[in-house]
Structure formats: structure tokens, C-alpha cells
Amino acid sequence: MKNITIAIAALALSFNAVANEATKEKKAPKAAAASKATLDVAASSATWTGKKLAGTHTGKVSFKDGEFEYKKGKLVKGEVDVDLNSITNEDMKDAEYNKKLVGHLKSEDFFGVEKFPVATFKITSFSEIHNFVAGQPNMEVKGNLTIKGVTKPYSTKLFFTPNENGFEAKGKIVIERTQFGLKYSAKKFLSVDKLKEIGDKLIDDNFELDLNLVAKK
């Protein structure tokens, strides 16, 4: 009789242990589901500026698409694609020269859009800039930039404004074109004689993109 009582008690303890574990599992908080925002390509824009000794050229390029991921209400990663076939020039008023310039930018000397129609920035982190000045960039974005099949780490600072529908962000990224094989008329790859021949047509190694991003959840 004593043995039966002990067995029943042990069995009860086992049931209690199982029940407690089940309760713990039931009460364990679920991981917060990630949410996403999509780039509004119509509302977003990018303005490029290229410099040479004789002056500057500027124009537009359009975004193809983009997506950003939130976790616990904070941006954690994203990806933005740029449609390089959309390159335009805005400062050359002569239609023929404008067409020649845009065609040259799309050629193998520069972006080679026939083979590489899209440039991509894969964002790996968003981090707040502490002690930022009001109206100045308040977010640093880091990631990997791919142009013409070459990928390099890049970062930029943005003036980031969240809202209930997503966010808006403005900023500038400076890109060293020679890192991506855009070597045409770049000083570091030219001989002294070639430099003399080119003169004031020498093109700066860097170009800039002024970004205006609008994303919606």
C-alpha cells in the first residue's frame, strides 16, 4: 500500500512538472514580427553632379524600387535599386550635346547600362547620430553599394523624418567612381602627356548623389 501511495505521488509530481512547462511555453513572449516599408519611386528622387576642371554637369536618375525592414519599430535593413537607363542631364541646353553626354554616361566608358542597368545599395544598418544639430543629418546609413558589377562598402548621413505612414529622408552620398571601374578621364590612370592633352576636360574621380527618399508602409 505504501509503494502504491509513493507511485501515485511521483506521478502527480510528473504531471505538475509537465503542466508548468506547458504554461511557461504558453506565456513565453513571441518575437516581434518584422514590418516593411516600400520606396515610393514616384515621390523619391536623386540628382547627380559630376565635376571637371571646366565646370560641372548635373541631372537626374530614377529609382527602380526599394524596400526597408523594421524590427521593434526601428529600421534595421533595406535595399534600394537605381535605374541607370533613366539618367538625364539638366544643364546642357543644346539637344545634340545633351544627347551625346547622356549617351556617353550610359556607355562602357562610364556606367555600361546595357550590361549593368541597375545600381544597388543594400543597407545593413541604420544608426542614430547622437548630438546632431537641428535640421542636419540625424541618421547614419551603412551598406554595400554595387555599380557595374563591383560591390564596395559605403555609408551616408541622412536627415530622417519618420511618420505614421513610413518615412522621408534627405542627404548626399559621394561616390568615388574609379572604385567601380569608371576610369574615363580620371587623373590617376592617365600619363603626363595624356593629362596635357585633356587639359580642362579632366573629370573628378568623385560624383555626388543628392537623395530624397519617401517610403510608405
Image (cartoon, rainbow, N blue to C red):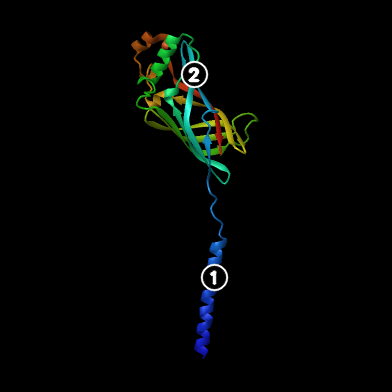
In this rendering, the answer to whether 165 lies above or below 119 is: below
Q: Nearer the viewer, residue 131 or 169?
A: 169
**On the rendered image, what quadrant is the C terminus found in?**
top right
Query: Badge 2: few (under 14), some or many (20 or more) residues near its Cα, within 10 Å?
Result: some
Q: Nearer the viewer, residue 183 or 215?
A: 215
- Residue pictured at 54% horizontal, 81% vertical: 9
- Label 1: element kind: helix
* Quarter location, residue 151: top left
In this rendering, the answer to whether 87 lies above or below 127 is: above
Hey, what amino acid is under mark 1? Ala
- Residue pictured at 64% horizontal, 29% vertical: 135
Q: Which mark is residue 59?
A: 2
Q: Nearer the viewer, residue 136 or 33?
A: 33
Q: Is residue 111 visible?
A: yes
Q: Position of residue 88 (x, y in %)?
A: 46, 19
- Residue pictured at 51% horizontal, 80% vertical: 10
- Residue pictured at 51% horizontal, 79% vertical: 11
**Pointer 2 with pointer 1, Cβ within 8 A:** no
In this rendering, the answer to whether 55 lies above or below 10 is: above
Specify the farthest residue to the right.
134
Hey, what amino acid is under mark 2? Gly
Specify the farthest residue to the front.
42
- Answer with mark 2 or mark 1, whichever residue precedes in sequence: 1
The residue carrying mark 1 is 19
Q: Which mark is residue 192?
A: none
Q: Position of residue 205 (x, y in %)?
A: 43, 20
- Label 2: element kind: strand
